[in-house]
Amino acid sequence: MPALAEPSLLDSLNDALDGLPEGAVTPDTSGGDQPALVVDRDHLVEVCRRLRDGDDTRFDLLMDACGVDWPEREERFEVVYHLYSIPRRERLRLKVRVPEDDARVPSLIPVWKAADWFERETWEMFGIVAEGHPNLSRLLTHEAFKGHPLRKDYDPAKRWLLTEDKIYRPKFLHLPEETDDDIFERMTINIGPSHPAMHGTFRVMAVLDGETIIDADLEIGYLHRCFEKMCETHTWQQVIPYTDRLNYCSSFINNVGYCQVVERMLDVEVPAKAVWARTVLSEFSRVMDHCVCNGTTLVDVGGLTNFWYMFQIREEIYGLLEACFGARLTVSGCRIGGLLADLPPDFMERSHALLEMIPPLISDVGKLVDKNRIWMDRSVGISAVTGEDAVNWGWTGPCLRASGVSYDVRRAHPYGLYDSVDFDVPVLYGGDVYDRYRIRMLEIDESLKIIRQLLERGMPEGPHIVDDPHVALPPKDAAYNQMEAMIYHFKLIMDGIQVPSGEAYGAVEGANGELGYYVLSDGSGKPYRIKVRPPCFPIFSTFPSMIRGQSVSDAVATLGGLNVIAGELER
Amino acid sequence: MTATETTQTTTRTNLPTVPHPTEVEPRKMTLAERMYLPLLSGMAVTIKHTFQNLFGLRKKVTIQYPEERREYSHRYRGHHILTTRPDGSVRCVACYLCAQACPAECIHIEAGEHPDENIEKYPLVYEIDMLRCVFCGYCVDACPEEAIIMSNNYDMAYFNREQSIVGKSELQKPYTFDEDQLGYRPSYPEEEVQRAQMRREAFDLVAAAKQAEETGERVSA
């Protein structure tokens, strides 16, 4: 991580926030991993607007917003906003503290449209009202659900029988008035929840005028599985299999992201071999994810052949992951402090074989569709999003880069070995379905370039996991034969890793954007709170605005290109 | 290359442009593209693949399941195995570490007193709910006795939920268990290296046989 608390940032913050009343903004002294401000809620919107617009601050991206519950504090709830400045490449954390009997904060939608779903989630999980929010209704849980499940006093074992008599009623906020000039009768249709073109169980309710969508609303949450609540009841190590199921197309990257944050909190140095393997396999996972995304998008518009070529790549990469960690989809490959197992002896040969196999298939797909007018007619100019809108909507990843904004976590905040390899961050300026497809193809090439360089450099020798009995399990033969190792073994499994109390936000470049983990520990051996910042969450929340005015078939093409993964969207 | 296809590299010193683009520049079609000409090269690709598959010029990708099976590594996390001692009794000493380590909470153990004083405990009941299990291998990592390991068996189908809770009798395997069916278990590096060597040799043999066959065919033709 770069030095975050550079004086220059504090200076620019002072400049931007000059003239606000006393007590509106105070520096957070709890000692987190990045600069943080405690903001009075009455001035929140003003502060955010200044931070966004200030020439020296330019915090243009709202990364994440979430609640934290501190039952023993006087002001029980804390709403934490993670801001990011693309030009400055710096992060800032804002905290707003609110008491339980008056749990409300102003809505930030006027400043960042990305706040929409984050505020809905904060309300449903903690009961913190975002004042001024146009549609503050349940997002991830069922409409009939009562209570706020991420509050500490909500029993994790509690079960509900949720019946169908109360269902989500769509809110069409941008519906134009019906006039006598309308040629067609309006019709409201459901696309999904279970529909082959939806890539998961999402429900899109669209109002059609003829074939044109004039307004749409979304319902998600069919795959909500209480990821964050379950993390609070399990040990740090036990969270790793849960992270597999976030973006299940590239589950290894999720493992890496989580382990990196916890390792930073523990101040553990990961062995060189593990770092190397994490970088190589992350890039393989990215190739796989992009292949799945592009393959299925093309299927949605009728290009079935590409799907087979793309899935062949995925199958073979799954083979490599399986040889390393024993599972194809849900790899659980990382452990805090290193890897699950040492790499197999034929790792290099298999990787080289993959590098020979992938490029011809990618180029075949390129020949089939890159300059194919049938595909271009379906994709060029469809759902075009400008860079400014994309940033305001909180987009990251390939979709943002297709809109002409160059932000990649691997380049802006290098982790792993990304600062020592040579790769480009492709940027395209069309912002449409075609460029979102194209940018993924270019990124596959870049990923292969990274892997090739790392393989040439050779696998570092040494252990695959840190030799620290407080973090990693001792080797099996030691645990069988030595008393001390045996005790550590039992302690680690019964009590878990003891992560010192504190907070940290760590991000990796997931396959569809910045995958962030905001982690709080109270030193008890279990996470106090883990908030995942899923990259497709803000992206999908803007789907209705994108498809407004387009036809149903364009909506299907758009959805494919966004790479929305239900597992991480709904957690 | 059209203008939109050029890529831009950003380094730490070269900050992205501010303000962000407020206009989109969609890709423009060239004359050849408007005339659908690139479709011909696409057609060439599909024809190439068709003939390659038709005449077996390439390894076939499809696996004819269930007649053919994918070959999994010896780290595959499949159905669990309770290992046994030479006398056929389970090695498990009912220490509950696996149940504690399980993130899905799918292991249920009831301990009983073992007649042998040196062993002390053994599981009266050892059940795994296969529908809850996420096959993460944490139980294998946790076991201090190498009593639970995994096989590479992934065929698990049940008619109802009760059947999916498997007990000691299904999990227990005889002491002399077929090595080829073993999956994720505490790793022994030398063994792995040996296996990789054998695999490589097997691949070479297959390749040599195939080559001989091809040349033989060519000679006979």
Image (spheres, rainbow, N blue to C red):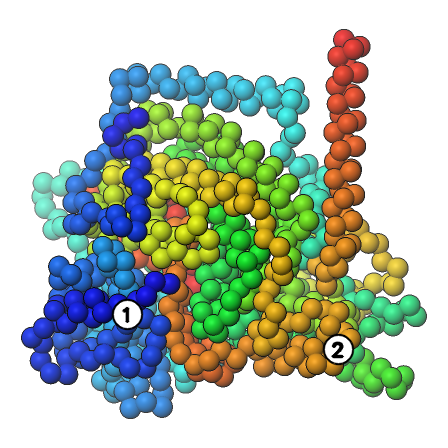
Crowd rating for badge 1 (residues with CA inside 10 Å; few <14, some 14–19, many 20+): some
Crowd rating for badge 2 (residues with CA inside 10 Å; few <14, some 14–19, many 20+): few
The image quarter containing residue B137 is bottom right
Near-viewer residue (A289 or A455): A455
Quick one: which residue is furthest to the left in this view?
Answer: A19
Q: Chain of mark 2?
A: A
The image quarter containing residue B77 is bottom right
Q: Is residue B108 above or below residue A196?
A: below
Q: CB of mark 1 within 8 Å of CB of mark 2?
A: no
Mark seen at residue B120: none
Residue found 39% across the figure and 47% down from its top: A563
Residue type highlighted by circle 2: Gln
Near-viewer residue (A567 or A471): A471
Q: Is residue A148 left or right of residue A254?
A: left
Residue at the disc numbered 2:
A482
Task: State the separation of the CA atoms marked 1 and 2.
Answer: 45 Å
Residue found 44% across the figure and 50% down from its top: A420
Residue type highlighted by circle 1: Ala
Residue found 23% across the figure and 58% down from its top: A88
Residue found 74% across the figure and 39% down from its top: B200
Can residue A344 be spotted in the picture? yes
Quick one: which residue is furthest to the right in this view?
Answer: B87
Q: Secondary structure at mark 2?
A: loop
Residue B118: percent from left, percent from top: 87, 84
Residue at the disc numbered 1:
A5
Q: Secondary structure at mark 1?
A: loop
Near-viewer residue (B4 or B200): B200
Residue A371: percent from left, percent from top: 35, 25
Residue A312: percent from left, percent from top: 56, 37
